[in-house]
Structures are given as C-alpha cells and as structure tokens.
Image (tube, rainbow, N blue to C red):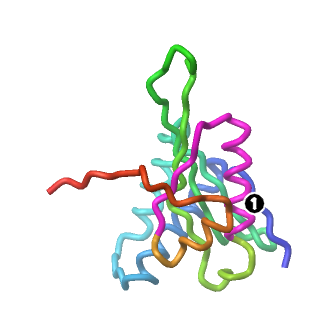
Amino acid sequence: MAVTARKATAADATAMGELRWRWPTEESGYKGTDRTEWVATFAAWVVDHARTHIPFVAEVSGQVVGMAWLMLADRVPAPTHRHRRTGDVQAVYVAPEHRDSGVGAVLLEALLTEARTLGLEHVTVHSSRRAVRFYERGGFDPDPTWLRWLPA
C-alpha cells in the first residue's frame, strides 16, 4: 500500500470535512443529521483559516484517508529573535481502516517537514493518551514546563 502525504488545497476541503464528520460518529456515536451542511461549513472554514492553519492530507490509491493541521502562531518578538513563530499539531485523523499501517507517520512527517521549512521555534501537540507513543516516535518529547489553564 503506497501512502502519500501533501499539503491540502481548497479542493480537498470536502474530503477533509467528511473525515472530520466521521471522527465523532465513530468514536463517540455522534448522530448528527446535518452532514451536508457541516461539510460545506467546514470547507468554508478551511478557506477562511488558510493563513493560520495549514492542512495536510494522506492518500492511499488517490483517496484521502487522513488529515492533520499545523496551526501557526506568531510570538512576541525579542531583541535577539525578531521573528518568532510556533506551531501546534491539530485534528490528526486517520480513517480506522487505515490505522496502524504507516499512514499517520507519513502524514506527521509531511507536517513536521513544513514546520522545519517555516523555521518554527517549536511545535506542540495535545494528544489523546492513546496517541502519545505515536508522537514520541515522531520526535516529540514530554515537557514538564508546559502548563495549561482551563476555565472554571
């Protein structure tokens, strides 16, 4: 099985919307009835957020079977580093029938290659417990200084 990953385009937005719909229906039994409306809304979101969210797709035999997003953020400049950008990996999803076959690894490597090309200071990911080892294999390390605040 040949897997390819690439930056997605607006033409891929519908396929990505379909994957994003599948995710909660398969993992938590979501039973929404507005699939067509959702996919159109998602496709518009992809276009509207193109400057801050770079989408990637994985394909097998020309079919989109996975997606991942690199969210970009500008950081406050410093006298020694006047252009500071970071990234965050978001919404990584591989269709269940293609999991554990290398699709996710190819997808993550395409995303991290782009992060290197952009010269990002660092890239973070908020992972499910199930995927922690996947990200560690991809080069991510736990960071004890990373803190988060959750609203009450």
Give the secondary structure at mark 1. Answer: strand
Span colored in magenta: 104-127
**In the rendered view of the protein, which quadrant contains the N terminus?**
bottom right
The residue sitting at 59% across, 45% down in the picture is 54
Left-right relation of 100 to 73: right
Horizontal and vertical percent position of residue 53: 53, 44
Question: Which residue is nearer to you in this view: 87 or 65?
Answer: 87
> Mark 1: few, some, or many residues within 10 Å (few <14, many ≥20)?
many
Number of marks drawn: 1
Question: Which residue is nearer to you in this view: 36 or 52?
Answer: 52
**In the rendered view of the protein, which quadrant contains the C terminus?**
bottom left
Above or below, comparing residue 134 to residue 139 in the picture: below
Q: Kindly indicate the quadrant of the structure image that contains residue 107.
A: bottom right
The residue sitting at 19% across, 53% down in the picture is 151
Horizontal and vertical percent position of residue 144: 44, 56
Left-right relation of 31 to 22: left
Horizontal and vertical percent position of residue 137: 67, 68
Left-right relation of 116 to 27: right
Question: Which residue is nearer to you in this view: 139 or 33?
Answer: 139
Horizontal and vertical percent position of residue 120: 62, 37
Residue pointed to by mark 1: 5
Residue 37 magenta-highlighted: no
Magenta portion: prevailing SS class: helix
Q: Residue furthest top?
A: 79
